C-alpha cells in the first residue's frame, strides 16, 4: 500500500470518485464519455483500456482494467450524484427564470463580485453574461411579436368598423399569447441555446450569496462518508477525487471536512484533481466564508496531492487562476494546488482545434476526453494508470502564466 511518506509505488487498485458540475443529466453520460474517449486515447497513446460493470457498492459507476507502460491496473470509478438537486433548481417557470436573472445580476453587481471576476478571465464572465443577454433578446423578440400581432388585429378590426375596447383588448390578448408562446418555444429548445440552463446554474450559485445550502451540505456529507469508507480499504493504493467545473469547489469542502475529521494512519494515497474549475464564481461572493475557509485549510495539507488543470481555450473556466490565491486566502504555508494548463492549442491538432474552437460547452468537457497530440495531461492515465497523482506530477512545475495574486473583495472565513 502507498502511504504518506513512503517511497513511490505502482498503483494496482484505485477508486475514483467523480464529482460532476451543474448537470441534470443521468450519470450514465459520464460512463459513455469515458468509454468512447478512453478508447480513442488508448488507440492514440498505445495502451489498453477495458470497461466492465462496477464491482463496488454505492453510487453509479464502472470498472476499468488498463495496461499502461507494462503495468496492469484496475480502477473503480463512481459518480457522486447531485443531478437531482440540479433538476430541482431548474424547475422555475419562465417568469421565475426572468426573476432569477434580475436577482442574480443584482447580487453579482451590487457586491462588486462581477467587477473583480473581470480582472481574472474574460471568458467565464462572458459565459455568465451570455444567458442574461440571450434571455433579454428572447424577451425583446416576444415583445415585438406581441406588438405586431396586436397592431395587425387593430388594423383588421378597424377595416371592418370595430373600434374602442373591442378593437384593442382582443388584439393585446392575442399578442401577449403569441409572445408567451414564443418564449415557451425558446425554452423547449434550450438544448441549443443554453440560456435557461446557464441562468439556473448561476442563480443556484448566487441564491445563497456563496453559502452552502442545507440540501447540498447533506449531500456533501454523503460524499464524504463514501470517500472515508474507501480510505479504510487496505487493498487500494490510491483514492482519487475528481471535481469538474462546479464539482471542484464541492470537492474542496468535502475533502477539507474529511481531513479535519482525521484520516486512517494506514491508508491509500489521497489525490484531488480539479478540472475546469469555476471556484471564483462562488468564493468571490460575500457569504462564501465556508468555502474560503476550506480553500485556506486544504491548500496547506500534506495528507493529499491537489492538482488543478484548466486551459485558456476553455472559455467557461477560470483558466490558470489559482483558486486559493485569487480568493485572497493563501497562507504562508500554502502547498496546493499545483496549477497548470492542459494547453488545448498544443495538445489538440490544428484540425481538431479548428473543429472545437467555438464549441464552448464541448471544450469545457475536453479534460475528460481524448487528445490527439497528448502532453503530460491524460485523464485516462491519471484515473486508470499505474502512478498516483502525487507521483505523476511530483516534479511538474506550475504554469508560469498562472494568476496567483489576491483579487476577491471578500476574504473573511468561517471559524475553523
Image (cartoon, rainbow, N blue to C red):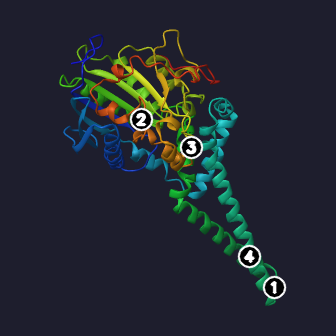
Precedes in sequence: disc 2 or disc 1: 1
State if disc 1 and disc 4 touch (CB < 8 Å): no
Q: Are marks 4 and 2 in contact (CB under 8 Å)?
A: no
Residue at the spot of label 2:
374
Residue 151 sits in quarter: bottom right
**Secondary structure under badge 4?**
helix
Q: Going 39% across and 47% down the picture, which residue do you hit?
A: 84
**Of the residues tagged 2 and 1, which is closer to the observer?**
2
Q: Which residue is mark 3?
A: 203
Instruction: Identify which residue is drawn at 28% across, 43% down.
Output: 60
Left or right of 166? Residue 87 is left
Quadrant occupied by the N terminus: top left
Label 3 neighbourhood size at 10 Å, few (<14), some (14-19), many (20+)?
Answer: many
Disc assigned to residue 52 = none
Residue wearing tag 4: 169
- Which residue is drawn at the image coordinates 40% and 40% (left, top)? 368
Provide residue 233's location: percent of width, then percent of height: 20, 25
Residue 398's place in the image compared with 156, above or below, is above
Between the C-alphas of marks 4 and 3, the distance is: 36 Å
Spot occupied by residue 281 in the image (x, y as percentages of width and height): 57, 34
At mark 2, the secondary structure is loop
Mark 4 or mark 1, earlier in chain = 1
Which label lies toward us, 3 or 2? 2
Residue 222 visible within the image: no
Say which residue label 1 marks: 158
Spatial CA span between label 4 and label 1:
13 Å
> Badges 4 and 3: C-beta atoms under 8 Å apart?
no
Q: Nearer the viewer, mark 4 or mark 3?
A: 3
Amino acid at each position: 500500500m502507498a502511504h504518506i511518506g513512503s517511497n513511490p509505488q505502482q498503483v494496482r487498485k484505485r477508486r475514483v470518485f467523480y464529482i460532476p458540475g451543474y448537470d441534470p443529466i443521468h450519470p450514465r453520460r459520464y460512463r459513455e464519455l469515458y468509454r468512447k474517449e478512453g478508447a480513442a486515447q488508448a488507440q492514440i497513446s498505445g495502451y489498453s483500456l477495458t470497461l466492465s460493470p462496477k464491482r463496488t457498492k454505492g453510487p453509479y459507476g464502472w470498472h476499468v482494467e488498463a495496461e499502461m507502460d507494462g503495468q496492469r491496473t484496475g480502477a473503480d470509478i463512481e459518480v457522486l450524484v447531485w443531478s437531482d438537486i440540479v433538476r430541482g433548481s431548474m424547475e422555475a417557470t419562465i417568469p421565475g427564470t426572468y426573476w432569477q436573472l434580475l436577482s442574480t445580476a443584482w447580487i453579482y453587481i451590487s457586491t462588486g463580485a462581477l467587477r473583480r471576476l473581470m480582472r481574472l478571465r474574460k471568458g467565464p464572465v462572458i459565459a455568465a453574461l451570455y444567458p442574461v443577454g440571450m434571455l433579454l433578446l428572447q424577451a425583446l423578440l416576444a415583445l415585438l411579436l406581441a406588438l405586431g400581432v396586436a397592431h395587425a388585429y387593430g388594423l383588421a378590426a378597424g377595416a371592418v368598423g370595430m373600434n374602442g375596447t373591442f378593437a384593442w383588448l382582443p388584439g393585446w390578448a392575442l399578442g401577449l399569447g403569441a409572445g408567451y408562446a414564443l418564449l415557451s418555444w425558446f425554452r423547449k429548445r434550450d438544448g441549443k441555446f443554453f440560456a435557461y440552463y446557464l441562468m439556473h446554474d448561476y442563480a443556484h450559485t448566487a441564491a445563497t450569496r456563496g453559502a452552502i445550502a442545507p440540501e447540498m451540505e447533506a449531500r456533501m456529507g454523503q460524499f464524504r462518508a463514501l470517500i472515508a469508507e474507501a480510505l479504510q480499504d487496505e487493498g487500494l493504493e490510491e483514492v482519487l477525487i475528481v471535481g469538474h467545473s462546479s464539482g471542484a469547489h464541492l470537492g474542496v469542502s468535502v475533502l477539507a471536512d474529511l481531513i479535519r475529521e482525521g484520516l486512517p494512519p494506514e491508508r491509500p494515497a489521497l489525490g484531488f484533481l480539479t478540472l475546469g474549475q469555476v471556484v471564483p464564481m462562488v468564493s468571490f461572493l460575500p457569504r462564501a466564508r465556508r468555502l474560503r475557509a476550506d480553500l485556506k485549510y486544504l491548500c496547506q495539507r500534506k495528507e493529499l496531492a491537489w492538482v488543478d488543470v484548466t486551459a485558456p481555450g476553455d472559455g467557461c473556466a477560470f483558466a490558470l487562476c489559482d483558486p486559493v490565491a485569487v480568493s485572497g486566502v493563501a497562507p504562508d504555508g500554502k502547498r496546493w494546488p499545483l496549477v497548470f494548463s492542459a494547453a488545448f492549442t498544443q495538445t489538440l491538432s490544428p484540425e481538431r482545434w479548428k473543429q472545437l474552437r467555438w464549441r464552448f460547452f464541448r471544450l469545457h468537457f475536453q479534460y475528460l476526453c481524448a487528445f490527439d497530440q497528448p502532453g503530460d495531461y491524460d485523464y485516462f492515465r491519471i484515473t486508470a494508470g499505474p502512478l498516483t497523482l502525487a507521483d505523476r506530477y511530483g516534479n511538474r512545475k506550475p504554469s508560469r502564466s498562472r494568476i496567483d495574486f489576491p483579487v476577491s473583495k471578500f476574504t473573511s472565513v468561517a471559524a475553523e
